[in-house]
Image (cartoon, grey):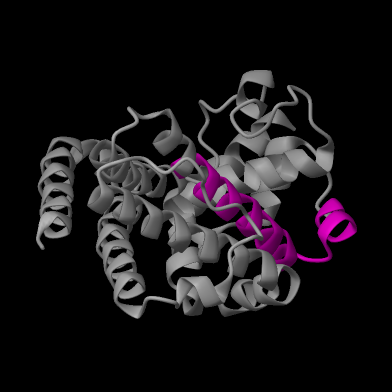
Amino acid sequence: MADLVKKSSRNTAKLHPAIAAQAPRERVLDSAFWLQFGEDPEPSTRQKMIYVTADDVSRVGPSTFNAGEMTQALGVAYSLVNFHFGSRDELLAETMYYVYTGYVQDVWAKVTSATRTPEIRMRTWIEALADKAAEIGGWGAVINFPTASLEVSGLVADKYGQEIVDLAELNLARVMMLISDMNKGQVSDKEPALGKVSSVSLLRNPAKTAQAVSVMMSANGLAILRGGRSATEAARQKSIDKILTKTHVTRIMDSLKQK
């Protein structure tokens, strides 16, 4: 039986190299792995499925993701996908919401831990966005290009539409605050809170909103570049990316300093 399993794995790698890349042989699903995603060293099976899916899709993207490979890595029956989530796409939708929430939270955590000067915090936000995009890899296809996975994007909109809007508005409000802080030369004491950002307040000054959106689009371009590469490509391009990131961030910062 063991020989049959090995033969099957070799055939999968040969015929479907992208699927084989989904679950690296060197990956160990132990407490250290789970703690990368949450605070529980031994999460529930359902939560483990979300974490492994998050990890798998980061390498191969949502369209190539094979839920059977995920359940096999965990040693559980495929039927648990339907039992816990309803379907493969619903699993991806819930995991996408989990990943996007972490995306926004982790980027801001870098900002709050940076030196409390306006310029450093703004630069940190841009750099952290690119770093996080590289980390989540294939999830960028769902976050930045919804039509790349219409079924999943539709489920996200249906189930988590308001939550996603709240996160997006929070992100915009934070960037507007960082730009305002640069203009004032001091760090704001009060920061925008999730679910407490008013759409009216975001549009009160169209010029400032447009400026923040332009910064976000420019930063997101760098994020898409960094996140759209495979692990092998990312390793090969690391030195180039470092130069590109520094140059691009400097240009964005210089544009904000112009009066």
- Residue 208, horizontal then vertical, whole percent: 32, 70
Q: Magenta residues?
A: 79-107
Question: Going by the image, does 85 lie left or right of 163?
Answer: right
- Residue 257, horizontal then vertical, whole percent: 13, 54
**Residue toward you, 246 or 14:** 246
Viewport quadrant of the C terminus? bottom left
Is residue 178 within the magenta segment? no
The answer to whether residue 9 is above or below residue 153 is: above
The answer to whether residue 63 is above or below residue 107 is: below
Determine the main secondary structure of the stretch shown in magenta.
helix
Q: Please report the residue visible at 77 percent of the width from the left and 36 percent of the height from the top.
A: 75
Q: Is residue 161 visible?
A: yes
Q: Please report the residue visible at 29 percent of the width from the left and 34 percent of the height from the top.
A: 117
Viewport quadrant of the N terminus? top right
Is residue 95 within the magenta segment? yes
Dividing the picture into quarters, in which one does residue 2 lie?
top right
Dividing the picture into quarters, in which one does residue 138 lie?
bottom left
Q: Please report the residue visible at 90 percent of the width from the left and 57 percent of the height from the top.
A: 83
The answer to whether residue 258 is above or below residue 151 is: above
Dividing the picture into quarters, in which one does residue 88 lie?
bottom right
Task: Residue at the far right: name it.
Answer: 83
- Residue 221, horizontal then vertical, whole percent: 27, 62
